[in-house]
Image (cartoon, rainbow, N blue to C red):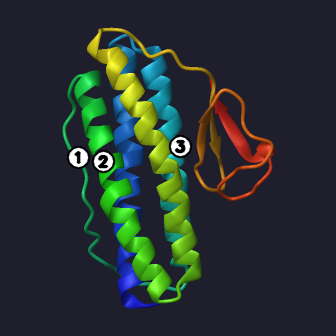
Amino acid sequence: MRDMVAADLRSAFGGESQAHMRYVIYAQKAKDEGFDNISRLFTAIADAERIHSTNHFSTMADVGGAFLVASIAGFGLGSTSENLDVAIEGETFEINEMYPAYRAVAKAQGEDEAEKSFKWAYMAEKTHAVFFKKAKKASEKGKDVELGVMWICQTCGHTVEGEPPDQCPVCQEPKEVFNSFE
């Protein structure tokens, strides 16, 4: 694997791992504040972030050793509304800056598996931002978000509300690979 792509995978792994844990913590805060649906949303998306970090890590199976992993991550625990701001900012950064750049480098260097891992995460992050913005609007009014069953594809992290598709539109896996968050 080319050094630049490996560094990007490590950075993405670090960022997604931190997002996973941050959302687990935010879910508990939302639950403590009486926002059960926002808590469930954070829990579901934390699972998608775990899948992204796992995919990035697995893509580096032939890379070994100890590395300093630099990644951008929001820190601090605020109110649920403030935590949603951090989540929206992080997802937006990944959509607009991080994953487009990482995908371009992986493509230019012919690293197909890395490009696929970055693409899958990018596609899911776009839906995460939409869900977090919807939750933010509700929280600003002191209300919980109206939210159906959340479904996470356990292969790529694709996230949907309601019913899972017969086939994941991102990785093409059957609906049986989706886990529900009710």
Q: Amino acid at mark 1?
A: Gly
Closer to the camera in the image, 18 or 80 = 80
Observer-side mark, 3 or 2, equals 2
Residue 120 appears in the figure: yes
Q: Residue at 46% of width from left, 40% of height from top? A: 128
Q: Earlier in the sequence, mark 3 or mark 2?
A: 3
Q: Residues within 10 Å of mark 3 (few under 14, many from 20)?
A: many
Q: Earlier in the sequence, mark 1 or mark 3?
A: 3
Q: How many marks?
A: 3
- Seen in the image, is 103 located left or right of residue 153? left
Q: Quadrant of residue 79?
A: top left
Q: Real-space Cα distance between discs 1 and 3?
A: 18 Å
| Rendered position, 16 above or below 57 | above
Residue 174 placement (x, y as % from top left): 80, 50
Residue 107 placement (x, y as % from top left): 49, 82
| Rendered position, 29 above or below 44 | above
Q: Real-space Cα distance between discs 2 and 1?
A: 7 Å
Residue 166 placement (x, y as % from top left): 80, 43
Q: SS class of the residue under badge 2?
A: helix
Q: SS class of the residue under badge 1?
A: loop
Residue 46 appears in the figure: no
Q: SS class of the residue under badge 3?
A: helix
Q: Amino acid at mark 3?
A: Asp
- Residue carrying label 1: 74
Q: Residues within 10 Å of mark 1 (few under 14, many from 20)?
A: some
- Residue carrying label 3: 47
Q: Residues within 10 Å of mark 2 (few under 14, many from 20)?
A: many
Q: Which mark is residue 90?
A: 2
Q: Residue at 32% of width from left, 39% of height from top? A: 87
Q: Earlier in the sequence, mark 2 or mark 1?
A: 1
**Dots 2 and 1: beta carbons under 8 Å?**
yes
Q: Residue at 22% of width from left, 28% of height from top? A: 82
